[in-house]
Amino acid sequence: MLDVESKTLLEVNNVCQSYSNGDDTPGALVLDHVSLRLDQNEIVGLLGRSGCGKSSLLRIVAGLAHPAAGDVNYRGAAVSGPISNVAMVFQSFALFPWLSVLDNVELGLKARKVPAAEARKRALAAIDLIGLDGFESAYPKELSGGMRQRVGFARALVVQPDILLMDEPFSALDVLTAETLRTDLLDLWVEGRMPIKSILMVTHNIEEAVLMCDRIVILSSNPGRIAAEIKVGLQHPRNRLDPAFRQLVDQIYATMTQRTETDKGRDGKLPGIGIGMALPRISTNTFAGMMEEIAAPPYEGKADIPALADSLHMEVDDLFPIAETLQLLRFVEIAEGDIALTAAGKRFADADTDTRKSVFRDHLMTYVPIAARIKQVLDERPSHKAPASRFREELEDYMGEDQAKIALATVTNWGRYAEVFAYDETSQMFSIEDLH
Amino acid sequence: MFSRFVAFTSLGRKALPNQWDIAALAIVLAIFVAVAQGSHGITAPLSRVETATMELNYWDLPYYGLRTTLRMFAAIAASLVFTLTYATLAAKSRRAEQILIPLLDVLQSVPILGFLSFTVTFFLGLFPGSTLGAECAAIFAIFTSQAWNMAFSFYQSLRTVPKDLEEVATGFGLSPWQRFWQLEAPFAMPGLAYNTMMSMSGGWFFVVASEAISVGDTTIKLPGIGSWLAVAIDNKDVTAVIGAVVAMLVIIILYDQILFRPLVVFSQKFRVELSMSQFQERSWIRDIFVRATGLRRIAAIPGEAIKTIGLMRLDWVGDSKFQPGWAGPHVARIVDILWYAVLAVLAVWSAWQIVGFVSTTLSWADLSEAVALTIITMVRVVVLIAIATVFWVPISIWIGLRPALAEKAQPLAQFLAAFPANVVFPVAVIAILRWSLNPDVWLSFLIVFGTQWYIVFNVIAGASAFPNDLKEVTANFGIKGWTWWKSVILPGVFPYYVTGALTASGGSWNAAIVAEYVKWGDDKVEAHGIGAYIAKATAAGDYPRIVLGVAVMSIFVIAFNRLFWRPLFGFAERRLRLM
């Protein structure tokens, strides 16, 4: 027992978090009773789609945000603010543009009152370790993305943290740069040349998680819950083409798509039904493209999601919202890592523009309640006009202001495509008059 | 490139004036009333101030120029101190923000020139028998023309510090002092530098107006170009007026080259854009400092000192104990209620003071007179801005589309905007008197004489920034003539135009106080309008009428900004901003 406790660096217990609505009332839940453990000598990946609260969780762990409920313990002591044994690497690099590479790296040491001479020595050592030699006096805007993120790593490592937190550290980089950085980081980790004891990383890239992590925690979204935990037993360096690697990737895809099935079961109905349905900003062109791809060979109406993602050059974050919205519109069905066109989906994929519009119109009116509501209100009013604010306010009863804005913009564009109603930006009015 | 740095207090807030605006307006005016009432008792020492007679000796002109410049420096230093404290307080405290920002909005719209006589008597009362009071009053007048937009720009920057950088600062445990100097102040640098430069331009106008001031029978002339000009006007000395113009030209050029070019170039370093911008501003002064190693070492000494101070922790500054919200929601709510109660009482008391002060000597007839005169001035401002628009927009577009020409014209327009137009006002009087022109028409042109350049250089900037691909499309489709103006270039430069016209309109209201009532020796030329009303009341030392005139004018300016410019600006940002 004692042995296990000393191995554990960090514990997250039943953490809940909600969006703040600006006033005192808590908004929608982002994290729902999430518990997590981080042991020494492991890389743990938090995998999930946008909106699953993985970044919020990371910020709670870092002490940058306070959870609405639950607690975080570091080596048995409660975390109530930023702690010096945790350092973070950001997706956007978060470098100070007015400081040189050396000054950026030294900043954290200065905050900790490390004497100037020692700070300089440690900063140079970190810069050396991370492969930034020769760039000490450069400013961030002179560097390429990869070099900037190296500064981000050096800045985190120089304070000698136990835990390194990484918030999608490679997703703002191009494919080649990201792979180089991943490999370099893994080399340092495997050789034990970094002062850190463990890494907690957030990612939405499944292959990246399998490549780097010892343990992958999958979060479901809206609200974020722990959906599954998968151990990765593969030896470093890992090979993406290794059948065991591929199998793990497939397994994770399946787990992540299964999630919708369990959701369905729990609520007894499809997720997000009713006016309060959160609509992501997806264009009808994207729907058409996706359905055409599934309809065409080699898939012929039914595709394995990892393979589809691969052939479309898409990542989970981009692909899942589209797939799920298509499912919502009953154009596809998702099950066990597969996506299959429904009869209507097939009809849409094969049809010409006008038929597509009419199929889409039927489904929009039947399955997207807010679209039906707009149409209904416009039909009822003698002027056949209604202000956007009326519907935005109705949506805000169910979701945050920003979400409502996005949902309304989305349904406006879908409605325009389906030619159900028109919208005038200047007056911010919906109407059914000036069609055709 | 310009409009992104321009700070408008009323943007992002509800258009219609709310309870905060009304409270702020009442408080500002009540302060003026209090100063006016207080100054009744101290008119005596005013006459005791020694007013050395000024000789129009051209050898003294550089010295006068230096004195004027030093006044500008003192004012800009005061503005910076004000900016760093006021804006920081507004950005860090929710309660302070609720009243400080509307206050800033009102202060920005008050024609401060109308209050010169109050501030002069007030400061003279502080330093009886010495010109220090008059110096302070002049510096204060310049300060009031500079501080508000700087403070607002800084506040806006503090509110938009990138979240990830904030998280880094928090994560590494930077102290509030370190966070301010390492993160917040550098982030605000480009906007602040630009607004300081703009403030400086506006300041020259006030330095000229505030050095020689008459209140009732007393005239104070501080050594400086403004006083030189006043004496020249009294003596009807045209050559001396030209001398003042030349001196002003030289000072502004030196100031711009030695101080502001390097500052703007330096501030580019603090932009949070992780790409090299294509247009690099240049400064020969800065190049000298960069190339000459000796100079660089000298410059590095204060640089290092500032860096060291900025990196000190100084944990006692901005201690979190004083931050609201830590005491728990109930305590916070009680403090909120107390705070609102104090503000409400203050606002009601202020309104009571103003009504009491004005109503003792004035009647409803005075109010309707002031309103009628303000409407005349408003018509004047609107018509003149419209004329300036019709005249300058096509010319500016023509210039802006020719990069080589724009590069030369742009600094000239900026320079003309900085040049204090009131220096050349007497020339207009000479012309009006000689040809017996109608002052109501011809004095009007002085209102936009100094402010039209804001429209010019903003539109030039807009036309220069017009995207090349859109130019190619119009050429490709052969879009010409009226269609080209209506659908291509006018919408393209519109956001820039609104920025320029808004600045010009604000400046024009202020200029009206000087422009509607102009003297040349013993000759006086005046137009009907609230500007002349305030100027005459000032000359007569009639405090209630000054308060009334300024109050009515302020309300008009605020309403005009909110109901006309703000929606226009919002429209431009929403619909016409090119990516």
Image (tube, coloured by chain):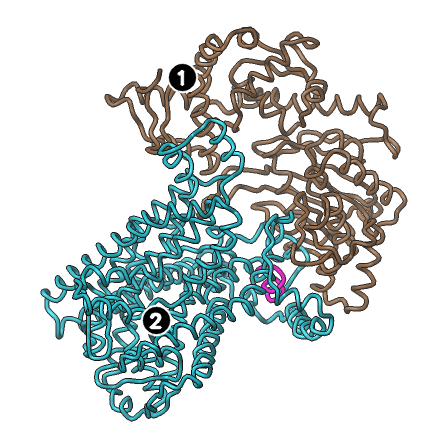
Chain colours: A brown, B cyan
- Residue B520 lies in magenta, yes or no? no
Residue sitting at 45 percent across and 24 percent down?
A413
Q: Give the answer, above or below, for where A291 lies relative to B513.
A: above
x, y (%) of residue B338?
Answer: 36, 64
* Chain letter, disc 1 residue: A
Rate crowding at label 1 as few (under 14), some (14 to 19) or many (20 or more) other CA atoms within 10 Å: some
Q: Nearer the viewer, residue A212 or A106?
A: A106
Residue A75 locus on image (x, y percent)? 75, 52
Say what amino acid the circle numbered 2 marks.
Val
Q: Which residues are magenta?
A: B177-184
Q: Which mark is residue A419?
A: 1
Could you classify mark 2 by the number of other residues whose Cα lies within 10 Å: few (under 14), some (14-19), or many (20 or more)? many
Q: Is residue A271 left or right of residue A428?
A: right
User: What kind of element bears circle 1?
Assistant: loop
**Where does residue A119 sit, x and y in percent of width and height?**
78, 64
Quadrant for residue A54, please give it: top right
Q: CA distance from mark 2 to mark 1?
A: 63 Å
Q: Is residue A232 above or below residue B416?
A: above
Which residue is depicted at the point 61% across and 34% down? A52
Image mark for residue B423: 2
From the viewer's perspective, tell me whether residue B37 is left or right of residue B184.
left
> Residue B270: which disc?
none
Amino acid under disc 1 = Glu
- The chain to which mark 2 is attached is B
On screen, residue B68 versus residue A39, left or right, reads left
User: A136 and B539: which one is in front?
Assistant: B539
Main secondary structure of the magenta stretch: helix
- What percent of the width, then of the height, locates residue B142? 39, 72
Q: Do callouts 2 and 1 point to residues on the same chain?
A: no
Local SS, label 2: helix
For this rendering, which residue is in front, B227 or B142?
A: B227
